[in-house]
Image (spheres, rainbow, N blue to C red):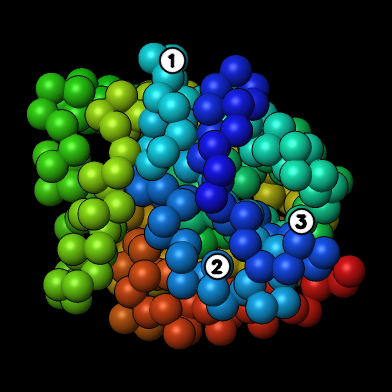
Amino acid sequence: MPIVHLNGTDLYYRDAGDPTANAVVLLHAFPLNSGMWQRQISALGAKHRVVALDYRGLGQSKPSAEPSTLPRLAEDVRALLAHLRIERAAVAGLSMGGYLSFELYRQAPGLFRGLVLCDTKATADTEEGKAMREKFAQTALEKGLEWVADEMIPKLLRPDPDPAVAREVREIIRRGTPAGVAAAQRGMALRPDSTPTLARIACPTLVIVGDQDTLTPVKDSQVMAKAIPGARLVKVKGAGHLANLEHVEAFDRALVEFVEGLAA
């Protein structure tokens, strides 16, 4: 699991499965890192090449003092895929990873064999939302990652979370940096409204959402699925925002079935 210097920074990534098979790129949620995908990497790895990276300052990638804007992160992803000589891939993004998927699609639509949007939304932040992100960024720098975990875990998981999953999420958050958390919040605040992008998505698309997700509720996923030509919606019962961790079997079944059904 190497670190490579690309696009002016050091990026940590996971490259697993069959290196000769069709690729799947997994884009993680905030404030986590590629470790959140370990079960999906195992589920997909038998038949696919699976790539997942840590965003700047989240996990083992080098933090940046600048906001982790979606254009900058998309350029990181494209640089990594060029380094790995991957020209086409199925892309799955959860939450912030969904925001990044939209930007990546705008930059490189030809990359996409398919798209999976998980527990995310297309709309931009309101002015109030942007102000809340800035306050979160400042407090993360002041109080550190334990505060970040305390703030985020109740929002990321269902109301009655499995204690083991909550501990796992906390450990993943702890692998980041306060600077990375702040940069990601400031970058997400700058993201554009991706609603106009939805109708332009021409690749097969699956939308997955936990039925107890309070951060990006089911209605947000319904709007996206309706607006993307031919998209299909799957609701994961008993899961909150991190559906891939709270109901692994149902999430993996939907993801693997979709990816295996894509044309080569």
Q: CA distance from mark 1 to mark 2?
A: 30 Å
Q: Secondary structure at mark 3?
A: strand
Residue 142 appears in view: yes
Of callouts 2 and 3, the N-terminal one: 2
What residue did someone put label 2 on?
41
Q: Are marks 1 and 3 in contact (CB under 8 Å)?
A: no
Task: Report x, y in % for residue 148.
Answer: 19, 40
Depth check, front residue: 185 or 4:
4
* Residue at screen point 60% across, 33% down: 4
- Quadrant of res 244: bottom left
* Vertical arrangement, residue 133 with respect to residue 37, above or below: above
What residue did someone put label 1 on?
66
Q: Amino acid at mark 1?
A: Glu
Residue 89 is tagged as: 3
Task: Report x, y in % for residue 157.
Answer: 25, 64
- Judge left or right: residue 143 versus residue 68: left
Location of the C terminus by quadrant is bottom right
Q: Are marks 2 and 3 in contact (CB under 8 Å)?
A: no
- Quadrant of res 114: bottom right
